[in-house]
Image (spheres, rainbow, N blue to C red):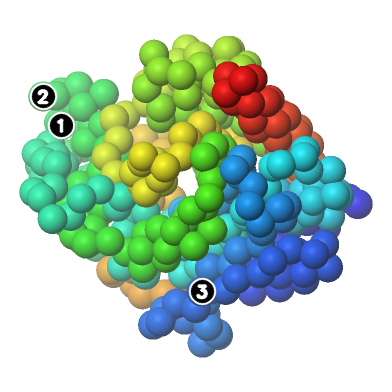
Amino acid sequence: MKASAYFSETYAQARAQFVAAAQEAGGQMGSYAHPTAKGPDGEPLFMDTAWFGPDDAESVLLNTCGAHGAEGFGGSAAQLAWIRENGPKTLPAGVAVLLVHAVNPFGFAWTLRGTENNVDLNRNFLDHRVPHPENELYDEIHTILCPARLDKAAIDKMLKGGANFVARHGQWALEDAISRGQYTHPDGYHFGGTEPEWSNLTLRLIIKRHLGQARRVGFIDWHSGPAGNGELIHLCFSNPKGPEFARAARWWGDDALDPKTVEAMWGSRRPSRRGIMFWGVESELLGRARVTGAVIEFRSARPKTSAADALRVSMLERWLRFEGGLDAPEAAAYQEEIREDYAPRRAAWQENVIENALTCYEQTLLGMANWGREDLRAAD
């Protein structure tokens, strides 16, 4: 099939294609309805699962998409391509796959990155019973970054304030303060929330229900965003000196996980992180299963030519949520801009996403099979 056939125009279409293809391929299906959030036409929203392979498999690939909402278009297409390209029929012996579609269905449906509560899910997976990590420099920059209007005067004022911040603290401090996650400004950037989101709790429930027998869990969490044309960036959050990181390097290559490669493809030094979903999966399986995997990004955006350019998509989302509203006259155009960053309709991008995703699935499942054989030899 042409790569474009795997890509959907809306969340509703993506969900329908995923469910139909998974059912046709013999997947064991599950659906988790969001209790409150609705889509643009008032439609219900779901996190869906499809299981392929033996029920008692001790080696399972857990593959998620849409944790960052609008980024789900690429991940959904990748999952659909794996199903339709006979992935379920070519599973290695003893290996199962659990696909989780649209971890953040609200963001997916509304072409936004955050959840219904403006929460960045990749900052939400931490213990909310203890004090949240501080991000004092974000407190300083928040007002500057959140103008009520998006006209030239407001943007110029923001850029001037940002330049003053950089003069005091440095460029890296600005990038880190914005991106690492903050827990004090619900209307701000990369807000991690003050309690577990529905998506967080539901994913944990899925893990409990489906991975109780698993001893070896591979994990691919599809994302998109950095500038490029469908190339993969492997963000492995395991201990760089530990066995799980080494195993991931055997699956995908030492170069793919090398920090120099990652930063070159990312376009800058990578900020620190708090509360990412990868660590949440690890914590949910702690003491029961080992986890090897990565957040894997499809490079997607056009290169940014200025600071305003780099911040524009985040500013558009915040403006839609807290200033203009999702029903504003500008909303459709702004949502299209957001989508163009995360899921462009360029034929070359779509073709590269599908080709690279299918190769990644093949590498990962081969690695899962070898992992199981290694454990059997060790047991002997």
Q: Are marks 1 and 2 in contact (CB under 8 Å)?
A: yes
Question: Pointers 2 and 3 in contact (CB under 8 A)?
Answer: no
**Rendering coords of residue 379 (x, y %):** 57, 23
Identify the element where label 2 is drawn: helix
Q: Regarding mark 3 in the picture, which secondary structure is present there?
A: strand
The quarter holding residue 25 reads: bottom right
Q: Which mark is residue 168?
A: 2
CA neighbours of label 3 inside 10 A, class few (<14), some (14 to 19), many (20+): some
Residue 29, compared with residue 376, is above or below; it is below
Secondary structure state at the residue bearing disc 1: helix
Count of numbered circles on the image: 3
Say which amino acid is labelled 2.
Arg
- Distance of label 3 from label 1 (alpha carbons): 44 Å
Between discs 3 and 1, the one toward the N terminus:
3
Q: Is residue 172 left or right of residue 265?
A: left
Q: Residue at x 15, y 31 (%)?
A: 165
Query: Horizontal and vertical percent for residue 249?
Result: 57, 18
Report the quarter where the C terminus lies.
top right
**Image quadrant assignment for residue 205:** bottom left
Q: Which residue is depicted at the point 46% across and 34% down? A: 290
State whether residue 35 is above or below residue 225: below
Q: Could you tell me how far apart the alpha carbons at marks 2 and 3 are, in whole angstroms?
A: 47 Å
Considering depth in this image, is 35 or 348 the residue closer to the camera?
35
| Circle 2 or circle 3, nearest the eye | 3
The amino acid type, in three-letter code, at marker 1 is: Phe
Q: CA distance from mark 1 to mark 2?
A: 5 Å
Amino acid at the residue labelled 3: Tyr
Residue 30 numbered tag: none
> Residue 271 location in percent, x, y?
32, 29
Position of residue 319 relative to residue 137, above or below, is below
Extreme residue in the front direction: 380
Residue that badge 3 annotates: 32
